[in-house]
Each structure stands twice: as C-alpha cells, then as structure tokens.
Amino acid sequence: MPSLERPLFLLASTNPGKVRELLALLGEAPCSWVTLADVGVAVEGPETGRSCVHNALQKALFYCHLTGLPTLADDSGLEVDALGGEPGAKAKEYAGRGATDAQRIALLLHKLQGVPWERRAARFRSVIALAFPDGRVYSVEGKREGKITFTPQGEGGFGYDPVFWVPEAGKTMAQMSVEEKNAFSHRGEAARKALALLKGLLGRGEGDGRP
C-alpha cells in the first residue's frame, strides 16, 4: 500500500513492461506511486504529437486532469537513419493501431531489406514528463544510440528491443537482464533524470503541487 506520509504520484502508462521498468527505476523517489490500474482508469491518453516531448506532456496533463494526481508519463520513439528518422514518435502505431510488437518489428525489418550493417544506425529516445495539479509541468529526456539487427535476438524486453543492438553491451536490449537494460537504456537515462528532478522538487517542500 502507498505510504500516507509521502505525496502520492500517478505513474501513467498502459504498457505493463514500461510500468515494471519505471517502478524499478523510480523506487528511490520521495513519493508513493499508484498506477492507472490502481486508480481504476482504463482510458488511453492522447498521443497526437509529432515528438516524444509533445506526447509525454500530453499524456501527463491528460491523466493529471482526469485524476487530480500529480502524474508522470513517458513517451518513447525509435529513429532509424536509413529511413529518414522513421518510425520516430509514431513507433507504437508504425504498423497500424492494434498491431503487435512482432508486426511492428516485421515491418521495420522489411523496410530495411538490403540496407547494410554500417547504415543501420538508430537511436531510442525517451521523454518523461511530470504534470502537477497546480499547472506546473517538467520534462527530461534520455537517448541511446545503436543499430537495427537483421533478425530479432533475445526474449526479454518489449517493443523494438529484440532488434535494437547496443554496441557497448554487444547485445540487443532484449538479450539484457533487467539491471543491464536499466543501465543502458534511453528510459533508464530519462528515469534517472526524473528521479533527480523529483528529489529536488520534493526536497524543497513543493509537495504534490495540489492547489
């Protein structure tokens, strides 16, 4: 159960994989977390922006207004240089609404057919946004450079993790342990920045931002 002695924050994601990763990464935050499932919210937040920053802020503000709770939301994108930056912030809808991770990966690999290894550079980008009931908003960003593999490798993670090769680790995101992924990933970098931001805000006694 959330502690009543610490401000209550909503972690707003409908993706169970993201929820698990973010809760692990933000465990040291000086607040208690509840999820959308905890507060009985099943509605999907808007993602109509052309950038991860816009989408993350959109979702954070939407769920903050809906629940009255200070809210953290994230949005991630995959930028592939050989495809002119596709799929970008639309990575989730790349193969159409309702598509599976496997279908999105299949489309990406199909578009990269014939592209040699040296031209398969890509990056994951993650933006975490915080929205408070008193109107304050903040955002932080993390980024991870890598390459797109020719075939999926690994069983862990979610999304495009099986085809995103991290040179420093010598493996895909899907081949990493949870601890490795948190250390190397774009979301891990953004979450560490968000954690520092939360510690700074709450350490200054700004509370949960309720009017």
Image (spheres, rainbow, N blue to C red):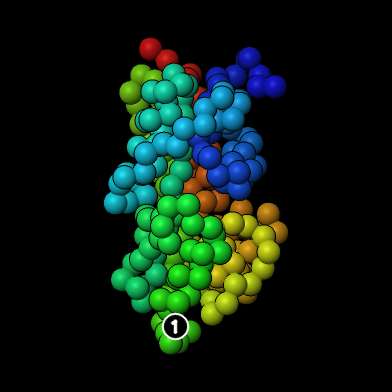
68 vs 51, left or right, is right
Q: Quadrant of residue 128?
A: top left
Using a 10 Å C-alpha cutoff, classify the residue at mark 1 as few (fewer than 14 neighbours), some (14 to 19) or many (20 or more).
few
Q: Residue at x 50, y 24 (%)?
A: 202
Q: Disc count in the image?
A: 1
Quadrant occupied by the C terminus? top left
Can residue 122 be seen here? The reply is: yes
- Kind of element beneath mark 1: loop
Judge whether 206 appears above or below 187 on screen: above
Q: Residue at x 37, y 49 (%)?
A: 52
Quadrant occupied by the N terminus? top right
List x then y, in percent, for residue 133.
Answer: 39, 20
Q: Residue at x 44, y 65 (%)?
A: 123
Q: 135 or 202, which is in the foreground? A: 135
Q: Which residue is mark 1?
A: 113
Can residue 206 be seen here? The reply is: no
List x then y, in percent, for residue 97.
Answer: 43, 52
Q: Quadrant of residue 176?
A: bottom right
Judge whether 117 appears above or below 70 on screen: below
48 vs 23, left or right, is left
List x then y, in percent, for residue 184.
Answer: 58, 60
88 vs 39, left or right, is left
Q: Amino acid at mark 1?
A: Gln
Judge whether 20 appears above or below 150 on screen: above
Q: Residue at x 56, y 24 (%)?
A: 40
